[in-house]
Amino acid sequence: MSVAVRFAPSPTGLLHVGNVRLALVNWLFARKAGGNFLLRLDDTDEERSKPEYAEGIERDLTWLGLTWDRFARESDRYGRYDEVAAALKASGRLYPCYETPEELNLKRASLVSQGRPPIYDRAALRLSDADRARLESEGRTPHWRFKLEHTPVEWTDLVRGPVHFEGSALSDPVLIREDGRPLYTLTSVVDDADLAITHVIRGEDHVANTAVQIQIFQAVGGAVPVFAHLPLLTDATGQGLSKRLGSLSVASLREEEGIEPMALASLLAKLGTSDAIEPRLTLDELVAEFDIAKVSRATPKFDPEELLRLNARTLHLLPFERVAGELAALGLDDADAAFWEAVRPNLSRVAEARDWWAVTHAPVAPVADDPAFLAEAAALLPEEPWDLSTWGTWTGAVKARTGRKGKDLFLPLRRALTGRDHGPELKNLLPLIGRTRAQKRLAGETA
């Protein structure tokens, strides 16, 4: 059977780097196996699900290049969930419960105070028809729990290895709310079964859910997928990430921090693995290197400073064609490959190219600390056309005339030509500045 995976976010907030790491791992796993990648919006939480978040999910994945082969939306499948729920009720695996949230909280607190796990006591199974009729006459509407088999649940996890749960140690999960709406524990299984998902790769916070959901797969007659539970990503301090809090959102990294998609993908693909973190320019490179067996069980930490360093290293390798659109969006419509190759070694974000565009194409106030020396240098400027050899030819002549060398030779020229002490190699900048501007700046004029 062809490999089929899914990324199933809830559109209840902005995707953060932890969410996208799971999307990326699923996508790489599918592409490595020649399988398909499903994007499914788990949007049955109608109070918190928002269209703008759904659009944001698609925008973030598209920006990263994580194209999907199939698309589904849980809110389109309520009829199917009702069918499955009816079948589970008829088989006795789904049973009505009438406790209020307050009553359930008291039960949990009592069990915890006794040092016992907060497992539902199945009191609802002991209700008679008359009891249920009385409760409903009082205005109580039942929620519905799945009756677990008290048998061992085992699977071999692609990350955690052999996993074992005792069914008797698990609490019967609520699958249908009082208002009739299905919960994630049911809808996810029905979707995975109906859409023939072969591998479920998700965070380790779902390990206990998996033990429950395996029994639900078996009850609905669905093939149980292979599971892989990845350690959850934290921030650099070890704190968990949250969509509600907007922690390290992909949108902010893209729009506010100016991060390149391949820098983020290169980092997230390697965090928590035995591979070195190096810049990659294509997702195909990451696919070729991917192996889920490399994922460690240790908690990976996401450090924005590491991402920024990797972003700079990525930019230093990107060809002009890959950034032309970004440069144009910055208003640098006339930027060409020569300009990009001149300035990219000094950038950590593409937006910083605007500063060097101003140096090469706009008036600059020179720093003319040594007018006599600069005048001698100006007199030796060669005629145009200029190319990458011009800087060496010119500074060689200035050195021979003045006897200066090293910092005494180069720093005054840099400060006059660019107004700065540091920057890209002047052999690359000089042809972009041009002879007219260079001559005026050497004379101390703003040009």
Image (cartoon, rainbow, N blue to C red):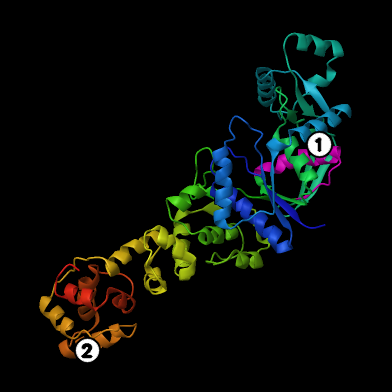
Element marked by disc 2: helix
Q: Quadrant of the C terminus?
A: bottom left
Numbered tag placed on residue 397 in the rendering: 2
Residue situated furthest front in the rendering: 333
Position of 331 with respect to 14 (left or right) is left
Q: How many numbered marks does the figure carry?
A: 2
Position of 217 with respect to 202 (left or right) is right
- Give residue 294's position: percent from left, percent from top: 66, 61
- Give residue 260's position: percent from left, percent from top: 48, 59
Q: Is residue 96 above or below residue 406?
A: above
- Name the residue rendered at 75%, 26% in the picture: 120
Numbered tag placed on residue 167 in the rendering: 1
- Give residue 357's position: percent from left, percent from top: 32, 66
Which class describes the residues within 10 Å of circle 1: few (<14), some (14-19), or many (20+)? some
Give the quadrant of residue 267: bottom right
Element marked by disc 1: helix
Asked whether residue 157 is in view, the answer is yes
Q: Quadrant of the N terminus?
A: bottom right
Specify whether residue 206 is painted magenta.
yes
Q: Is residue 7 above or below residue 344?
A: above
Residue 414 or 381: which is nearer the viewer?
381
Label 2 amino acid?
A: Ala
Look at discs 2 and 1 and give the one toward the viewer.
Answer: 2
| Lower position in the chain sequence, tag 2 or tag 1 | 1
Which class describes the residues within 10 Å of circle 2: few (<14), some (14-19), or many (20+)? some
Numbered range of the magenta stretch: 205-226
Asked whether residue 298 is in view, the answer is no
- Give residue 346's position: percent from left, percent from top: 37, 68
Would you say the magenta stretch is mainly helix, strand or loop?
helix
The CA distance from mark 2 to mark 1 is 85 Å
Label 1 amino acid?
A: Gly
- Name the residue rendered at 85%, 34% in the picture: 149
